Amino acid sequence: MARLPRAYYDGKDQFEWASVLARQAQNRQEAITALCEILKDKSNHKKGSIFRISLFALADAKASEALPTLVELLNELDDPVCKADVKHAIEIIEPKK
């Protein structure tokens, strides 16, 4: 069985940080920081599973603290699919009224 690519921040991969964000309210800010750092690493942009797991963990948690990073990514990304995913995540976190 093939393993999905992993990106690590402070010893945990994107799956572990997504789990921390979803289940451990006391570690929310640490998980948001970790997932944002994983997203900012340009080498992860072409690795869909890393990018999307990190991005949608933030969206599912309605992590408004991540919005500055997501807006920055939206402006920097060249890949139209990644841009669309970031835009969608922003809309989930902060729906237009």
Image (spheres, rainbow, N blue to C red):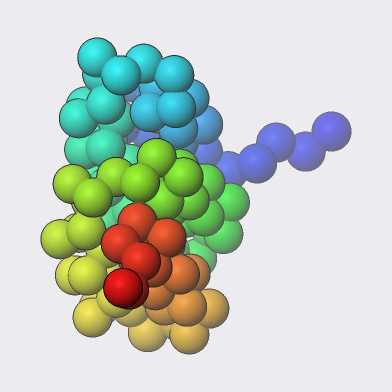
> What residue is drawn where x is 25% and y is 78%?
76
Q: Quadrant of the N terminus?
A: top right
> What residue is drawn where x is 21% and y is 58%?
67
> What residue is drawn where x is 21% and y is 38%?
33
Is residue 2 shown to the viewer in this render?
yes
Where is residue 37? Give x, y as percent.
25, 46
Q: Is residue 36 above or below residue 77?
A: above
Query: Is residue 66 left or right of 14 when viewed as pictured?
Result: left
Q: Is residue 82 above or below residue 12?
A: below
Q: Report the front residue among 13 and 94.
A: 94
Where is residue 63? Give x, y as percent.
29, 45
Q: Report the front residue among 18 and 60.
A: 60
Where is residue 55? Give x, y as percent.
42, 53
> What residue is drawn where x is 35% and y is 66%?
95
Q: Quadrant of the C terminus?
A: bottom left
Q: Quadrant of residue 41?
A: bottom left
Residue furthest front in the image = 97
Q: Quadrant of residue 87?
A: bottom left
Where is residue 88? Give x, y as percent.
45, 70
Q: Quadrant of residue 12?
A: top left
Q: Is residue 16 above or below residue 84?
A: above
Q: Is residue 30 above or below residue 38?
A: above
